[in-house]
């Protein structure tokens, strides 16, 4: 019941917001209020979950299509509760930002944002393959409209590329879902066994690789991230990419042990390549959004290295880094949005010197940046260390790549901070551009605060993701 | 003496859907003559609606009482759940079409329109009950002739007349091919009844196979499967939109259900031959329909090609040749009919506003101006593409499952690839409705403000409800489909 409420609440809110003929501000506040209620609901659910016991909790299941073995089956594990939590928090911040910048056609906009939230939470809660597929697909429609109708100049091409890439992956996944479910006799993730069919595994893996995105399926990323409204980019980068993480952890790894073994090396190499390639592209990017977008590609590569390293340390690190990355990319993108609103551009060549006279912006950006580049003592450092240690178990080469990635992250984050804040004011920076307003601070500060809390206590997430500390064993046993 | 004449026993109940619609048709025709002109449309549409609803109730009654299939009237027709299920879908489609057709601008011929509509439905109801080749042909010609006239009924529009002429010529050719094929089958087996043809066990007699091929071609014409689809884009584009909506949903339902029955009852021994043939036709339909639709600017033509590709999807279900495949087909027909009728109804709404053909340019901004039609069209386009939260997803899902179970994993990949292609043009329609700025179109108010058409809105809302409803209440529909499919033996 709790889980179903968490899923249904945003959808019900979306309908309410779409249909009630309220004035602009009222619609925005209603939408933000619903998002906050969802966060509260999640806190209650997270408190109810017994992390020491682990396993599937807060579960419910009803038969949907009996003839094929499809059921409406939902529930949370430790790691998926954290992913759902970061979803509702980031989405609340994004909706708040949308209210702050007063998006056009607010009723449609907020209905779509809330619908997107509901679909993503449903993805993390799904314990039936068809339900997972439905939720995975349902994310696409709001994103398509949000980017296509409220996006920047090149939104047409951006949406087209994004939709084509995602749908190719999703439809391959549909074929894989059909094949898996029919051969297992049921579509329930809890009841079905394992399969050693590499093609079915690839159907899932390619879909998740496109969603993450993973090198070399990342072609949609630069344009989509640049052209979407900034808070939608924050949601895309922070939350939607984590559905791929969930897919890998819940479906790809436990259900296909042999194909994973066979293809592990290839996937680790691709993920590592994505980490390095994304970092290098981030360093070379000339606009703020580009840097953060490519850093997102790099971080997802890092997370996938952690997942496919497939030992306890790496899996804990992967989940922790997923949570971190969601919070970091959300705060970074929101901050980038705030900078863009003040200067009218994201081009690094036109920015600079914003720290003078704007201490709050400088501090928040610096803190977020420091955490992003995994300064020792931060939660990202803990996560990356765990992943590095775990990757070492697969081969010292992977650990070396992760270390390289950390170094490269430092380079591009410092470049971003320096280009925005330091030296002389850029051509687009005017003295009248104000510091972070209280409202903007209220949106970003909770995200940074969560990151600081996690920096002091990373074990909050990393040690409660799987039953105790035994991620590899739990997954190998298929989450039973 | 009269009492001593031996009258054959006639089981009237299974004939009632067809008879109810025939009666309605007669009454509509009378209304064309007896009722004053200004009342004609209202009276005729009420009669047609009542006839469709009566037929639907009779179909439900027949479904209830026909747990075991048997034939009637000297084995020329069947009484079974498959026919009843198809008749139910046809009757409900007809009822919704009455709402779509009510607001259509027509100077005259209102009574005739509804008379032909109900007569065509009666013919389709008769067609799906056919148990031998003669009744099959009879039913086919019955509903086809009504459709030919319906397509051309807007005699003041050249495109309508042209479409009607094309349909007559090509449809006549298709029927002739089917008849010739039936003659060959009769020559090979000496039998006309479906079960008798199977029992005659003529093996791979060349006449039989050739006859089967020609019958398949003739039925392919009717269900607009490529490469027998040449008439579809022009006829769908030229016909009045309500007739197009009717054709896209009802004709396909009738043709597909009958093909399922024919292939499994009359030609089970040749299943390895027709499985391959149907698979090939399905693949060609999927490829041709989707590729051609990508190039279309006129929305009705685009939807026509999309309906060709959906015929391909549904043929995959027949190709599986299993009970699961039959269930999948029968399930798919429910959301497909709803989405088809709904999509053409939305196009009709725009057409009536502009009094001009609806293209991707002229539909710009429609979504913002008329939110109900816009969001409904969203739903229908996404449903056609097989997106979740619509019955279209389950339709494709069940079809793919049936094909995979039957061992044809490759056709699942073809279907998936076709779906990927189709997304391009479905999303294009939605994008055209919402994302281009409205000033690109001048709204030509024909004779005043844009017409307020509550009947059309009801039809679109009903179609949307069925599209979404068939996603959430999938199992009950599947149970009905499974009962219906049990009437055939696999």
Image (cartoon, coloured by chain):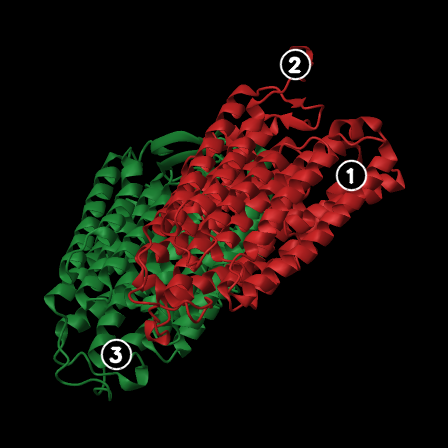
Evaluate if marks 3 and 2 touch, with contact meaning CB atoms under 8 Å apart: no
Question: Quadrant of residue A223 in the image?
Answer: bottom left
Q: Can you tell which of label 3 and label 2 is closer to the viewer?
A: 2
Is residue A60 at least partly visible in the picture?
Answer: yes
Q: Which residue is mark 1?
A: B272
The local crowd at label 2, few if under 14, some if 14 to 19, many if 20 or more residues have their Cα within 10 Å, is few
Apparent side of residue A326 relative to residue A104 in the rendered image (left or right): right
The answer to whether residue A435 is above or below residue A326 is below
Above or below, comparing residue B131 to residue B373 in the picture: above
**Residue that appears at 48% across and 65% down:** A218
The quarter of the picture where residue A78 lies is top left
Q: Chain of mark 3?
A: A
Instruction: Kindly identify which residue carries mark 3.
Output: A420
> Does A60 sit above or below residue B365?
above
Viewer-side residue, B113 vs A422 = B113
Q: Disc 2 marks which residue?
A: B2
């Amino acid at each position: 019941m709790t889980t179903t409420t968490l899923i249904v609440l945003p959808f019900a809110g979306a309908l309410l917001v779409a249909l009630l003929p309220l004035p602009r501000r009222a619609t925005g506040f209603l939408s933000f209020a619903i998002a906050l209620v969802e966060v509260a609901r999640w806190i209650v659910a997270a408190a109810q979950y017994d992390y020491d016991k682990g396993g599937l909790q807060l579960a419910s299941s009803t038969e949907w299509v009996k003839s094929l073995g499809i059921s409406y089956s939902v529930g949370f594990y430790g790691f998926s509760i954290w992913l759902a939590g970061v979803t509702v928090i980031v989405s609340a911040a994004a909706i708040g930002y949308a209210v702050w910048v007063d998006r056009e056609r607010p009723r449609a906009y907020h209905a779509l944002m809330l619908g997107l939230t509901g679909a993503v939470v449903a993805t993390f809660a799904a314990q039936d393959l068809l339900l997972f597929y439905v939720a995975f697909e349902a994310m696409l429609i709001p994103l398509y409209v949000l980017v296509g109708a409220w996006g920047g100049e090149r939104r047409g091409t951006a949406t087209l590329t994004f939709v084509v890439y995602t749908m190719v992956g999703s439809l391959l996944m549909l074929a894989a879902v059909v094949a898996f479910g029919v051969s297992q006799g049921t579509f329930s993730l809890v009841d079905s066994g394992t399969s050693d069919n590499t093609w079915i595994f690839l159907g899932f893996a390619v879909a998740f690789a496109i969603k993450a995105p993973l090198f070399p399926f990342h072609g949609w990323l630069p344009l989509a991230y640049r052209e979407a409204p900034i808070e939608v980019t924050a949601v895309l980068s922070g939350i939607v990419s984590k559905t791929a993480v969930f897919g890998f952890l819940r479906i790809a790894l436990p259900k296909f042990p042999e194909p994973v073994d066979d293809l592990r090396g290839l996937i680790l190499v691709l993920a590592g390549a994505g980490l390095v390639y994304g970092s290098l592209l981030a360093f070379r990017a000339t606009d703020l959004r580009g840097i953060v977008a490519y850093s997102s590609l790099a971080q997802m590569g890092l997370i996938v290295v952690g997942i496919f390293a497939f030992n306890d340390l790496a899996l804990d690190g992967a989940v922790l880094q997923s949570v971190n990355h969601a919070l970091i990319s959300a705060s970074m993108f929101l901050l980038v949005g705030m900078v863009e609103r003040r200067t009218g551009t994201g081009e690094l060549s036109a920015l600079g010197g914003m720290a003078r006279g704007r201490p709050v912006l400088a501090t928040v950006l610096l803190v977020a940046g420091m955490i992003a580049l995994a300064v020792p003592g931060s939660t990202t450092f803990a996560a990356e260390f765990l992943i590095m240690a775990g990757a070492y178990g697969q081969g010292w080469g992977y650990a070396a790549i992760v270390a390289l990635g950390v170094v490269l992250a430092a380079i591009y984050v410092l470049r971003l901070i320096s280009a925005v804040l330091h030296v002389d004011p850029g051509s687009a920076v005017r003295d009248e551009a104000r510091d972070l307003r209280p409202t903007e601070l209220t949106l970003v500060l909770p995200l940074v605060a969560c990151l600081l809390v996690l920096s002091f206590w990373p074990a909050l997430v990393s040690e409660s993701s799987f039953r105790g500390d035994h991620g590899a064993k739990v997954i190998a046993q298929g989450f039973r | 003496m009269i009492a001593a004449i031996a009258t054959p026993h006639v089981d009237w109940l299974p004939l009632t859907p067809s008879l109810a619609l025939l009666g309605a048709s007669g009454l509509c025709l009378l209304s064309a003559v007896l009722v004053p002109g200004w009342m004609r449309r209202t009276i005729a549409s009420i009669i047609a609606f009542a006839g469709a609803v009566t037929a639907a109730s009779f179909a439900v009654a027949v479904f209830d009482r026909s747990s075991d299939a048997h034939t009637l009237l000297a084995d020329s027709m069947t009484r079974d759940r498959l026919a009843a299920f198809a008749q139910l879908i046809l009757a409900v489609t007809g009822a919704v079409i009455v709402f779509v057709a009510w607001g259509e601008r027509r100077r005259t011929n209102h009574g005739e329109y509804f008379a032909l509509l109900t007569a065509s439905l009666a013919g389709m109801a008769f067609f799906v009950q056919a148990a031998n080749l003669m009744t099959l042909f009879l039913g086919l010609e019955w509903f086809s002739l009504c459709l030919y006239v319906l397509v051309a009924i807007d005699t003041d529009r050249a495109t309508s007349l042209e479409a009607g002429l094309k349909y007559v010529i090509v449809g006549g050719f298709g029927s002739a091919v089917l008849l010739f094929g039936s003659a060959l089958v009769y020559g090979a087996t000496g039998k006309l009844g479906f079960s008798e043809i199977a029992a005659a066990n003529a093996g791979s007699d060349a006449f039989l196979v050739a006859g089967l091929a020609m019958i398949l071609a003739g039925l392919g014409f009717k269900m607009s499967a490529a490469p027998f689809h040449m008439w579809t884009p022009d006829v769908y584009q030229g016909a009045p939109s309500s007739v197009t909506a009717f054709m896209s949903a009802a004709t396909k339902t009738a043709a597909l259900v009958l093909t399922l029955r024919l292939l499994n009852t009359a030609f089970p021994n040749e299943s390895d031959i027709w499985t391959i043939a149907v698979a090939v036709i399905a693949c060609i339909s999927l490829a041709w329909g989707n590729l051609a639709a990508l190039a279309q600017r006129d929305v009705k033509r685009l939807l026509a090609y999309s309906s060709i590709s959906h015929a391909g999807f549904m043929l995959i279900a027949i190709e599986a040749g299993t009970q699961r495949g039959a269930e999948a087909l029968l399930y798919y027909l429910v959301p497909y009919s709803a989405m088809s009728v709904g999509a053409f109804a939305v196009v009709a709404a725009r057409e009536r506003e502009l009094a001009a053909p609806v293209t991707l340019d002229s539909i710009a901004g429609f979504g913002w101006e008329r939110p109900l039609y816009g969001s409904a069209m969203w739903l229908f386009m996404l449903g056609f593409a097989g997106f979740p939260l619509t019955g279209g997803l389950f339709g494709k899902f069940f079809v793919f499952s049936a094909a995979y179970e039957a061992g044809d994993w490759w056709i699942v990949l073809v279907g998936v690839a076709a779906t990927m292609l189709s997304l391009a043009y479905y999303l294009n329609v939605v994008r055209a409705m919402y994302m281009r700025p409205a000033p690109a179109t001048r709204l030509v108010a024909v004779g005043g403000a844009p017409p307020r058409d509550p009947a059309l809105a009801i039809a679109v809302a009903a179609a949307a409800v069925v599209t979404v409803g068939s996603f959430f209440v999938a199992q009950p529909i599947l149970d009905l489909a499974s009962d219906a499919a049990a009437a055939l033996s696999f």
